[in-house]
Image: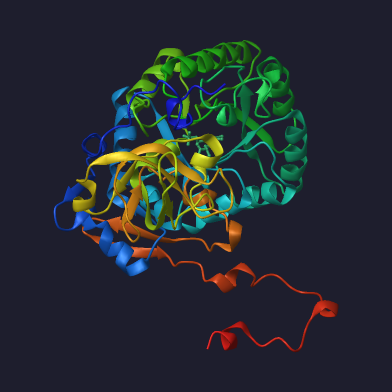
Amino acid sequence: MQSAASLAPTDRANQQPDPATGDMLATRPHLSMHAVSGLLLGDVPLNAIADTLGTPCWVTGADILRSRYRELTGAMAEAGLPVSVHYAVKANDHLAVLRVLGAEGAGADVVSGGELRRAVQAGIAPEAIVFSGVGKSEDELRLALALGVGQINVESAEEIVRLSSIAAGMDRIAHIALRVNPDIEAGAHDKISTGRLGDKFGIDHRDILALYAQAAGLPGLRPVGLAVHIGSQIDRAAPFRAAYRRLASLVDALRAAGGQVGTIDCGGGLGVRYRDENGLSPRALAGAIRAELGDLGVRFAIEPGRWLVAPAGLLLASVLTVKRQRDGAPFVVLDAAMNDLLRPSLYGAWHGILPLSAAVAAGPLSPAHVVGPVCETGDSFARDRMLPELRPGDRVAILDTGAYGAVMSSTYNARPLAAQALIDGGRWACIRARQPVEALWRDETVPDWLQRADLPPLQDRLR
Ligand code: LLP
């Protein structure tokens, strides 16, 4: 199923008209359009960053990260819930993003040894890290135990046995939560729904009692509670409540059987506004947790990714060419592509597009297809989007790309990874240099029987 509006194809019939420039700015107070400097994030003209770093280029606003984090923790505190926030590193794993959120007090939710190392490298204490994921290698589990991560969320009977033997062999005690598959339809896009029995995630809720008891009897393990994560970009409280209700009855049953349950990891999944969705407020999430789990006397963890970082990021791009068709809207070809921002191609996701120039933005609107230069029809950011006239050299910002943006980039079509900048207060810095093209083949080797001694170095041929 494909119900979430943000993920629906942009050319879907019967949809509301795309929000106008003014509406997009009004719903994103961190953005403003200055008559001379053009689009600003906070006080910083985005053109200044593009002039220095070139395009495509990702920009992240540190102040937005902080204010989102504070809104989230404030909502939990207001509801009287003892909650620790474990930022889902997968949404945006840049060290500077982790540093900003870590300094605010965030722990981390990681799903690989790489993310675990990144989080620790950025200064997040291992005890504040939850290691999730449906498949963890022995090396990854050893790393987690050696660093002393706070909690490992296990997802299968097999993993419980394997982790027990690794932990016991290392003379460590792994604090584990069993990730429950509650069999709930989250109403999110099919590709990012994770809590139905047909999905690969979690342990069938009907097997939890037996496995919890088994884990409690195994060396090297201490079951501390349950975890659940039913999907992403969820904009209704009802699926969260249904999942949490399932967990509450499991906690009752576990306790009745003599089990100790001290913590519940309520997962991530809070939706944001990309187009005209409502998203889900942290207050609504806090309400769902309190209503269904608030009387259990447990500590809570949450693992939000998208909600914290999506609105904090932009992708800047320049128009390479405008290809006018005999029929239909023109193709505005950007220098950014699906290898940079995959969400529109992969999920049909809608992202706002704003010109960086106030003069361009003020022009009359007409439909355009906004695409990248990659050789796939799916390399498209928008179809029939109402936009002011864009000419070669004009720049645009693709909005709300702070989550699942740069992290999902590839170098397809031998396109190096884009530069990244961080805006913090009135200043900004480059936080990732554009990848040099040579880096694309630096780790490749040509076997010696295929070597050619007669090839001059590439740079000599460019003279
Ligand atoms: N915890 C676990 C176990 C997860 O698998 C995820 C996301 C999160 C937390 C964070 O969920 P969030 O709060 O960000 O919704 N690439 C997709 C989203 C994939 C989400 C995967 N898991 C997209 O671009 O929409």
286 vs 19, left or right, is right
x 26%, y 64%: residue: 48
- Between residue 350 and residue 189, name the one nearer to us: 350
x 56%, y 26%: residue: 228
The x, y position of residue 235, in whole percent, is 41, 23
Q: Is residue 235 above or below residue 97?
A: above
Q: How many marks?
A: 0
Query: Within the image, what quadrant is residue 167 found in?
Result: top right
Q: Is residue 42 visible?
A: no
- Between residue 35 and residue 88, name the one nearer to us: 35
219 vs 307, left or right, is right
The x, y position of residue 59, in whole percent, is 36, 55
Extreme right residue here? 449
- Quarter of the image with the N terminus in it: top right
- Between residue 70 and residue 408, name the one nearer to us: 408
The x, y position of residue 402, in whole percent, is 40, 46
Q: Is residue 256 visible?
A: yes
Extreme front residue here? 326
The x, y position of residue 280, in whole percent, is 37, 25
Q: Is residue 442 above or below residue 67?
A: below
x 40%, y 63%: residue: 431
Q: Is residue 259 above or below residue 322?
A: above
